[in-house]
């Protein structure tokens, strides 16, 4: 039976939060209000994060509840490569108290939406439902995420889903080159792909169960809710099977290392070539501002805007936009370039030279800084008014991934100093195109 949004792999909405509210629930450990949402920790170490009405009217009928397993692809080892993707695909299948069929049928009958997704750091099981149904569905969600059976006869269906999702990903050049960029920049850990390849050693349900068990500890689990009060969510967690999860000693994950100057180039026969560059930045706020300064996707329907990358795109006939990504121990700002294969080298050279020009002091003007602040603030504000954006922000924050929305301390001078430091170093690079036409970093 089809599963709601079962093929979702990643959520790309950037994390942000702007409002602040207190937390008054009777948590068993210290409670706090962090970056605009309520946080608490249960007696066994599970994090509980909630946002009751941020970004949506108080009269909203909807709520979402999610269990976050800090077991994303960065925690895979050579013996478990692809494990996180398989674990994501096992969401809402047979568990001790209910079958996968029952879970989906109950969701359909009550209009709920179940989904799972995967990031480099987390696997997320989530249900969106009417507020009055939160207690009912949280009980199902908690049981499904804490007591999965991993039956051997389920593996064939799960494997087929994983293969399909990986095939979709491999047919998308943007996804392929972005995965290669992370591999070049981080090698292992954050460099592990979120998509399982055909060479993955995961060959049975027991392999997936072993991957699940390796990090199944209360301090590697978080519960996230939107449209539900912090007191209600905490009470639900404390009465659920999650309250019985033990804290175990987890294998330590090596700290992320960014490899400047590393590059991966992949041959492709497509007429269009893709090239990506990534620079490590000190924090998520710096990455967000630098990406908006360089120019993310244009805000106007016809044209590419006034950003440095936007102007280059219009003047020279290629596409270039900036992006940023943040994790618990590393953040990057990058550029994605798309052009005809014969023009790729000149396009990359133009972009590289433009970026290098900002490595000198005071290279960012007040006007350019104002544009970057306005666009970064608008991106945050737009997402903060959607339940999905708030959910992504809470999930991202569960295990320390930085979230930034307050740029009040930034200035043109401070951003210029940051740009000079970031862009004076060699980036990591990845490309997809004709390798005879692809420029290497030492030629830029």
Image (cartoon, helix red, strand yellow):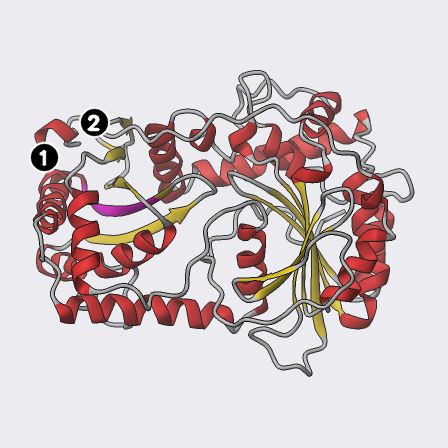
Above or below 254: residue 148: below
Where is residue 33 drawn, in percent x and y? 60, 63
- Viewport quadrant of the C terminus: top left
Q: Is residue 333 part of the magenta span, yes or no?
A: yes
- The stretch drawn in magenta includes residue 223: no
Q: Where is residue 87 shown, x and y percent of the image?
A: 66, 34
State the residue at coordinates (12%, 39%).
342
Question: Could you say which is closer to the camera, residue 158 or residue 90?
Answer: 90
Q: Which residues are magenta?
A: 332-340
**Badge 2: how crowded within 10 Å, few (<14), some, or many (20+)?**
some
The answer to whether residue 299 is seen in the rendering is no
The picture places residue 101, in percent across and down from the top left corner, at 84, 47
* Label 1 element class: loop
Q: Disc 1 or disc 2, which is closer to the eye? A: 1
Residue reaching furthest to the right? 97
How far apart marks 1 and 2 lie (CA) works out to: 15 Å
Residue under pointer 2: 435
């Amino acid at each position: 039976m089809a599963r709601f949004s079962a093929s979702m792999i990643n959520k790309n909405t950037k994390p942000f939060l702007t409002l602040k509210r207190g937390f008054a629930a009777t948590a068993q450990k210290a409670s706090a209000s962090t970056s605009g949402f309520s946080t608490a920790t249960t007696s066994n170490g599970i994090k509980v994060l909630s946002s009751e009405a941020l970004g949506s009217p108080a009269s909203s009928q909807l709520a979402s509840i999610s269990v976050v397993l800090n077991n994303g692809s960065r925690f895979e080892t050579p013996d478990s490569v692809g494990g996180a993707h398989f674990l994501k695909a096992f969401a809402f299948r047979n568990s001790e108290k209910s079958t996968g069929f029952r879970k989906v049928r109950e969701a359909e009958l009550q209009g709920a939406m179940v989904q799972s997704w995967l990031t480099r750091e987390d696997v997320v099981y989530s249900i969106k439902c009417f507020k009055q149904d939160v207690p009912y569905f949280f009980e199902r969600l908690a049981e499904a995420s804490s007591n999965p059976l991993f039956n051997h006869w389920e593996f064939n269906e799960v494997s087929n889903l994983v293969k399909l999702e990986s095939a979709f990903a491999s047919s998308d050049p943007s996804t392929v080159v972005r995965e290669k960029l992370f591999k070049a920049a981080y090698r292992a850990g954050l460099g592990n792909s979120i998509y399982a390849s055909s060479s993955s050693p995961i060959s049975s349900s027991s392999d997936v169960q072993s991957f699940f068990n390796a990090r199944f500890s209360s301090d590697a689990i978080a519960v996230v809710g939107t449209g539900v009060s912090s007191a209600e969510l905490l009470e639900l967690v404390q009465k659920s099977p999650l309250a019985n999860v033990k804290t175990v000693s987890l294998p330590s994950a090596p700290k992320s290392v960014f490899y400047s100057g590393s590059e991966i180039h992949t041959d492709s026969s497509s007429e269009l070539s893709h090239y990506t560059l990534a620079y490590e930045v000190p924090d998520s706020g710096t990455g967000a501002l630098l990406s908006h300064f360089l120019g993310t996707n244009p805000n106007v329907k016809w044209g590419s805007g006034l950003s440095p990358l936007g102007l280059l795109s219009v003047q020279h006939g290629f596409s270039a936009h900036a992006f940023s990504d943040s994790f618990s121990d590393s953040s990057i700002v990058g550029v994605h370039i798309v052009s005809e294969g014969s023009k790729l080298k000149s396009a990359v050279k133009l972009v590289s030279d433009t970026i290098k020009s900002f490595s000198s002091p005071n290279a960012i003007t007040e006007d350019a800084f104002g544009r970057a602040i306005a666009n970064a603030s608008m991106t945050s504000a737009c997402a903060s008014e959607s339940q999905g954006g708030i959910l992504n922000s809470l999930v991202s924050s569960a295990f320390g991934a930085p979230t930034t929305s307050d740029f009040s301390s930034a200035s043109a001078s401070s951003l210029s100093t940051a740009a000079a430091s970031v862009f004076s170093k060699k980036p990591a690079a990845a490309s997809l195109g004709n390798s005879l036409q692809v420029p290497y970093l030492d030629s830029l």
